[in-house]
Image (tube, grey):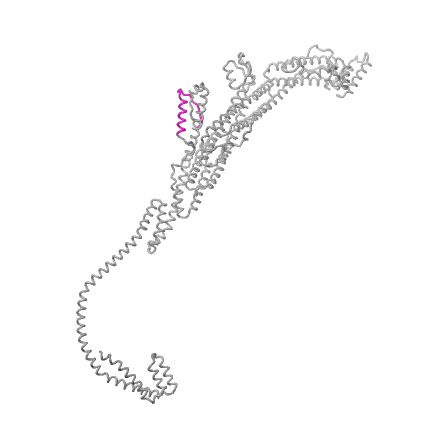
Amino acid sequence: MKSIVSTEPSVNTCEDSKSSESSSANPEISAEQEFCLYELETLSDSSSIGLVLRAIYDTGSVHKFTRALDKRITHYDKSILRVCTHHYQGFLDSLKQLRGLKEKCAEIRKNAEETNQLVQEESRALLKRSSEIVRYRKLQRNANNAIQQISMCLPMLENYAQLEKLMEQKKYLQALKVLEDLEHNYLNQLHKYRFAHQFAKSTGPIRDQIRERSYSELTDFLENLMKSSERIGADASKHVDEFYTKQQLCTISSKRSQACSVDPTLSRKQQSLDIKLSADGSVIKTNISTSNSSQNLQQQLANSTEKHQPIHCRFDAYDKLDFGPVHRCCQIFNVLGDREKFEVYYRKQRFDQIQLILERHTYLSKENLNSINSFIPYLNTIIGFFIIEDRIAQMQSTLVTESHKEELWELTLCRITETITSHFGNCTNVDLIFEMKKLILLLSLTIKSYGYNPNPFYNLLQNFRDKYSEILIEKYAIKFKETLESDDCTPIETKNEEEYRQVISEFPIYRRGIDHEAFPRKFPFSRFVPQVYSLQAKAFITDCVRFMEDLQLSQSEVGDTVRRYCNVLFARWSDELKMFIGCQKRSLVQLIQITINMGYLERSCEFLERIISEAARNLSETDISNFSGGSGNLSALAFDDTAGHFVALKNQLFRDSRSEVEQLIDEAFREKVQAFLDNLNYDWELQHPTGVASDNISDMITFLTSTFINFTNLPNVLARHICMQACKFLAERLHSMLLSPKHKAISMGALEQFSLDVMQCELFAAQCPVPGFEDNALAITFAHLRQLLDLVMGPDWTTFFSERDASQQQRTENSVAPKYTRVKASNAAILLEKIVEYEKRNAGFFALNRGDRHKLYETILKKLRSFND
């Protein structure tokens, strides 16, 4: 092999020499052919051969090139032969070496085969063991991977199982938290697993299911609230009622203690009194036998007050309710991102619920119009509803906002006001109105303790107060009418001390010396006065004040309100009295007794004023004491009724009605006088007078005298007025009769008889049975008639004319008073004409001194007509 290697450079040397020899040994080959051959020998790319051949064909020396190519081939063959000959011995040596090498290779091959067989046999078991090791290692690796993946999936699967369990247990908030944890912490890590994709797809339905079930749970919770609202409202109202009742009892006990400390005798008297609560919550007194009852009551009240310190009237009536559902729903929808939708849904549901509650009044039976039993659960439900809203607002301020509460409350206020007004607008039962007032007041106090505005309820209470007063006024107006119609118009007469004390207790009359009078004792007024005063006026005041209890009105407001209502009642009474005396003709006895009664009722206004002031003061002190320890300022309960303005009782209403009765009395007296005068038939041509007054005039004077003597109970002013008016009327009627144009002639005898009648009237006026007139004050009413008669019957024309002439001149201080100041010249002329006419009719007229008398009368008449009256 070494020889072969050594021969390679020699071969190359031979080739180089051959090429050089060929180039030198073939001088016939042109340079161009030589170049083409060189190109063909050196071309490395067979694609270029075509170019060389094309160049040969293009030159047209193909035959030459062919010969040159043959010569070159021959030259190379010789060179190859020379080289082969040169290296043949080496080739043989190489073959010998190869033959020896073959034997060694066979031996090596044999050893290799034996070794290979031995290795194959030994490695077969090793391969088997290695494959097992590989399999187990792969199995272990897969197991580790599986454990790792399962470890990653296991929390998710556990949480999913817990999620399903929580969904079954209806614990949706915890389930939603688990779902959120799965989505945020596990799904991103396990997104390559198909079950994770399935779970990711199921999260939406699970959320929807939680949302629907949360809505369902909230609906069930709200339905439960609807069922519990009435109970909660009733408990809260009961607590507020008990609180203010205890305040009232404490106030009463404190007053009793103060009164007993001031007056020990009062303490001994009140030892037998006990205070209890009636069914409607008012305070009543009962008699007990134990002497320590007052102290026991005070001790109980003190203990009760201490137990309830600090004093407040807010009652957590919702403590028995589980507000967990609404709290969970808020958190659930907050996590779901639907908090606003949930709040809108909740508010809509509560709005629908309050609408449903407020519409309950449409189902109130007409049979319950005379009872408030149907309104108690209705109002309790409303109270409970807003107590629950207040509690939820404390828990979830964004769920129940102040604007939401105010909107619901404003709606409720309007509907409650409309409901109560429509239901009780035409009610005429004062007891029912009073019970409804207490119910509205309790509603106001209860709802105010939870922060709601009850001011519209106070306006409603004011309307109820006005309605209550209207019903009372109508009630007592009817009683007044019945009492007026049933009155016998007879002064009260008491036969013994008991009857006397009974009348005194019913009407506060005082007359000096009445206690020392012998029985039977008479009162000026009839039974009508104490009945109206005690059973009607005082009862009306008591009922009015009773309605204002616990309204926190000031003393002036209570007093002004009661006085205002009393004035309205007095006006109704005055109208009833006017209707009573105007519906039919009343006797003079009735009219006189009525005016006496009205006078005493007018005087009773002073006592009623004291009663009103005392009741207002007591009520104001009680209310202030009751609410001084209460829950906040309740001054809003005070109505805006001209605070500080004092309204007085209008006793002039009785005075006005009494004035009308007095006018009727005047008319009755005039009718009586006119009746006597109508029966008085004068013979105006009487020759000689009878010497005594006419019978009708005497009877009339007797009637007037007896009437004024018997009715001594008439007020002096009224008696004087009636007497004066009667005398004036009598004088005017006599004067008109004397000057009446019905009779044209009057004799002197008729004038003398007429003068006797006038004299009888003057005697009555001089002996007036009514005291209090000034001297000749009553007799002056007949002065013009007397002066006219004296002037004509005198005759005294000279004096009359001289006085008339003197009246036109200035009188001196010492001049005598005129005698005929009340005589009118025209009246004197009329009467004189009647006398002249009678004398004309007389047969002996102007028989003696006819011309002189005629001239005298003509002169007098002419003179009289010349005067200007």
The furthest residue to the top: 691
| Residue shown at 22% from the left, 61% from the top | 131
Position in image of residue 233 (x %, y %) = 42, 35
Q: Quadrant of the N terminus?
A: bottom left
* 389 left or right, relative to 595: left
User: Residue 775 location, x and y as percent?
Assistant: 66, 14
Quadrant of the rendering where the C terminus is positioned: top right
Q: Nearer the viewer, residue 591 or 677?
A: 591
Q: Between 16 and 820, which is closer to the camera in this rendering? A: 16
**Side of 333 relative to 425 (left or right):** left
Relative vertical location of residue 342 with respect to residue 637 in this rendering, above or below = below
Indicate left or right for 760 with 842 as reference.
left
Q: In terms of image quadrants, where is residue 711?
A: top right
Toward the right, the furthest residue is 851
Is residue 159 toward the left or the right of residue 526 in the image?
Answer: left
The residue sitting at 34% across, 84% down in the picture is 37
Say whether residue 788 is magenta. Answer: no
Task: Identify the residue at horizontal 46%, vertical 22% (top origin).
Answer: 259
Q: Which one is in front, 97 or 694?
A: 97
Instruction: Tell me: residue 179, above or below residue 820.
Output: below
Q: Of residues 60 and 198, which is closer to you in this image?
A: 60
**Residue segment shown in magenta:** 280-306
Count of labels in the image: 0
Place of residue 726 in the rendered image (x, y in percent of width and height, measured from the top left): 65, 18
Q: Is residue 617 visible?
A: yes
Residue 426 visible in rendering: no
Of all residues shown, which one is farthest toward the bottom? 28
Q: Position of residue 521 (x, y in %)?
A: 54, 14
**Residue 301 lies in the magenta stretch:** yes
